[in-house]
Image: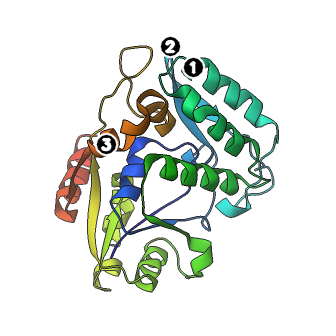
Amino acid sequence: MKIAICQPTYLPWLGYFDLIDQVDIFVLLDNVQFQRQSWQHRNRLKTPSGLSWLTVPVMFRGRFGQLINEVEVRDPEFWRNHLRAIELNYRRARFFNDYFEQLSSRIKAPGARMVDLDIQLIQWFINVLGIRTSVLLSSHLERQGKRMKLLANICESLGATEYVSPLGSAAYLLQEIDILLDKGIDVGFQHYEHPQYRQLFPPFCPYASVLDLIFNEGDRALEILRGGRRNPFLPNEVSEMVSAKVGAR
């Protein structure tokens, strides 16, 4: 049983869905602390001048320490500017008309919570791409603990034998990796090399939202997305990478 656990993200990039696609169960970590100006409520579009941010305004003043699933959208009409920006930058894309109305209906009606918007969009992208991985919410699993203890308890409750981590989590995961290993759970780190595909406004820019891929490539999107997957890094390989990075500073 292979499992990955990540915080819900707004309009995620390709690597997020590569991680979902390569595991049996993907857990959305919605009951940990929210971070302002994080991927949880913003992401990037490809525009004629490069990548440009789309940020969902959220309530944060006086709410320090709130959990991701407690964060509320500050402006319920934010979607007007977001959909306008998406339309302006993608209306010439080959598959724009195939997907824009479906995307619009999901951005317009998320409810008051940011997490509901993220989850609704993630599930829609999964369906469009044709990914069959089961997706669960950590808040529904009712596991206790912080940092790696929480992740390990989630993995154990789901019968995980392997945990696949985003490479960006390596620094803290390696410090506490024994918590997973002691439970008999092997650890691998995602190795993803961003593929190139047909894209408006050359030159090609990687790391845009996955909607860039879907609007430009349609039903070829999953095949292209999978083209960036490489064999996972082993913990010792990542440890050497982290040490080299620290030594270069």
Classed neighbour count for the residue bearing mark 3: other residues with Cα under 10 Å, few (<14), some (14–19), many (≥20): few
| Left or right, residue 110 beside residue 98 | right
Q: Secondary structure at mark 2?
A: loop
Residue 159 visible somewhere in the drawing: yes
* Mark closest to the chain's N terminus, 2 or 3: 2
Q: Secondary structure at mark 1?
A: helix
Tell me the amino acid under the disc marked 3: Glu
Q: Which residue is mark 1?
A: 89
Judged by depth in the image, the label closer to the viewer, 1 or 2, is 1
* Mark closest to the chain's N terminus, 1 or 2: 2
- The picture quadrant where one finds residue 231 is bottom left
| Left or right, residue 227 beside residue 92 | left
Classed neighbour count for the residue bearing mark 2: other residues with Cα under 10 Å, few (<14), some (14–19), many (≥20): few
Q: Which of 97/212 is in front?
A: 97
Taking the spot 57% from the left edge, 20% from the top edge, the residue there is 89
Classed neighbour count for the residue bearing mark 1: other residues with Cα under 10 Å, few (<14), some (14–19), many (≥20): some
Q: Secondary structure at mark 3?
A: helix
Residue 50: which numbered mark, if any?
A: none
Tell me the amino acid under the disc marked 1: Asn
Q: Which residue is mark 3?
A: 223
Q: Position of residue 99 (x, y in %)?
A: 57, 35
Q: In the rendered view, would you say 13 is above or below 64?
A: above
Q: Which residue is mark 2?
A: 48
Judged by depth in the image, the label closer to the viewer, 2 or 3, is 3
Q: Are marks 1 and 2 in contact (CB under 8 Å)?
A: yes
| Left or right, residue 177 beside residue 125 | left
Q: In the rendered view, would you say 49 is above or below 67?
A: above
The quadrant of the image that shows the C terminus is top left
